[in-house]
Image (spheres, grey):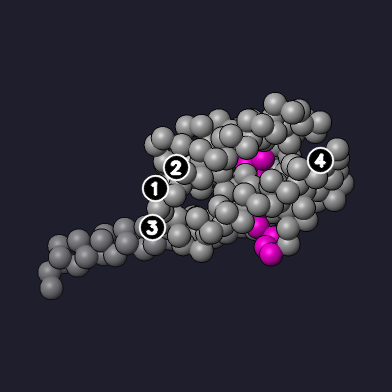
Amino acid sequence: MTKKQEKKKSKWLSLLILIIGILAAGVIGLSIYYHLNDPSKEAMDQLKKNPPKNISNQESVLIAEYHAKYNDLTGYGSIEELDMSEAKSLSAILEKDTNEIISRGIENKQVSEDFKQIHAIAKATKNKADKEQIRLIHRYFHDLDIAINQYSDTKDVFGVTKTLGK
């Protein structure tokens, strides 16, 4: 091997080591960031300090029921094979149910805002289901179920609601 070839090889090896080092630093940095900024822990601390108040039985039941329905529709990997017809149908029913509950009045301001967001997404997805929007509806009900009904099958919080996490 000539000196020129050795020098070229050395440059490529140095570049490769530099790239691997940068990638490793990035992975370590992200791991530390997510470990220190766990939204689930922050949300659960918020819930302990300031639990939602003035929640009606109807609101509580609706949250639990729709969380279960959207778990069935999107959970455990089902979102990847989302049945668009079923998603649109569920969104249409959800739009009616949320409209009814919003019209009656929701005493808790944060829960009211969350229901208005859910209603808007349901209205948008009843005719044209969008996988990410359907996932978002599930996340709203997931977080609300934790906050309102003490749902405890998981400690994961998505932080999408005003009630818990936003």
Looking at the image, is mark 4 or mark 3 earlier in the sequence? 4
Q: Secondary structure at mark 4?
A: loop
Q: Nearer the viewer, residue 99 or 150?
A: 99
Given residues 103 and 117, the one toward you in this image is 103
Residue at label 1? 84
In front: label 3 or label 1: 1
Which amino acid type corresponds to the residue marked 3 in the rendered image? Glu
Which residue in the structure is indicated by mark 2? 88
**What range of the chain is rendered magenta?**
153-161
Element at label 3: helix
Question: Residue 165 placed where, x, y %?
Answer: 70, 43
* Residue at the spot 74% in from the left edge and 28% down from the top edge: 104
What residue is pinned by disc 4? Answer: 56
What's the CA distance linking mark 4 and mark 3? 35 Å
Number of callouts: 4
Q: Name the main secondary structure of what is drawn in magenta.
A: loop
CA distance separating discs 3 and 2: 14 Å
Tell whether position 157 is magenta.
yes
Tell me the distance, in whole angstroms, between the alpha carbons under discs 2 and 1: 6 Å
Instruction: Mark 3 vs mark 2: give the one in front.
Output: 2
Amino acid type indicated by mark 4: Ser
Residue pointed to by mark 3? 81
Q: Is residue 22 visible?
A: no
Going from N to C along the chain, the mark reached first, 2 or 4, is 4
Name the amino acid type tagged 2. Answer: Lys
Residue 51 falls in image quadrant: top right
